[in-house]
Image: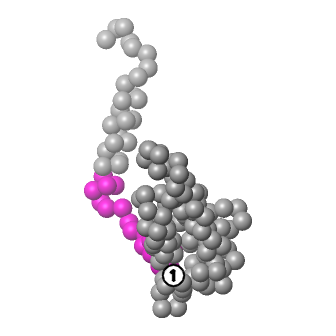
Amino acid sequence: MIRISDTISIQDWELTEQFVRASGPGGQNVNKVSSAVELRFEAASSPSLPGPVKTRLRRLAGRRWTTEGTLVIQCDETRSQARNRDLARERLAELVKKALTPPKRRIATRPTLGSKKRRLKAKKVRGEVKAMRGKVDPDT
């Protein structure tokens, strides 16, 4: 069981772990040992998470969220299978903790007087540049 907060915890039956061979350098060890872990959490159908948390989790997960509503976390950082498993579970807990906090509402602010003046000055300069374009009078 992964404890996220006082009210939310993810049960072991909601998680599926699959161990695969890690990619990248590592010599013969890479070819023999399945040390990388692929942790799957059926987030969309999870009874542990409330609806708004699921929505925020989906947005935070990005490409790790499948069309079936499964959150897939892969970890092949270390050569130890147990350590990779722990790291994947920590990442899952961290992601769900981020999804627990609702985003802050943006407070609309007025533009400062200085920024207004700078904008108007830039517009005036640009207008003067454009005014200088056009036909050149050969008499002057």
Q: Which residues are magenta?
A: 98-117
Mark 1 sits on what residue?
2
- As rendered, which of 83 and 67 lies closer to the eye? 83
Q: Quadrant of residue 114?
A: bottom left
The residue sitting at 59% across, 83% down in the picture is 11
The residue sitting at 37% across, 25% down in the picture is 132
- As rendered, which of 63 and 11 lies closer to the eye? 11
Toward the bottom, the furthest residue is 6
Membership of 102 in magenta stretch: yes
Residue 140 falls left or right of residue 29: left
- As rendered, which of 31 and 5 lies closer to the eye? 31
Q: Is 120 above or below relative to 84?
A: above
Q: Is 127 above or below relative to 11?
A: above
Membership of 60 in magenta stretch: no
Toward the top, the furthest residue is 138
Q: Quadrant of the C terminus?
A: top left
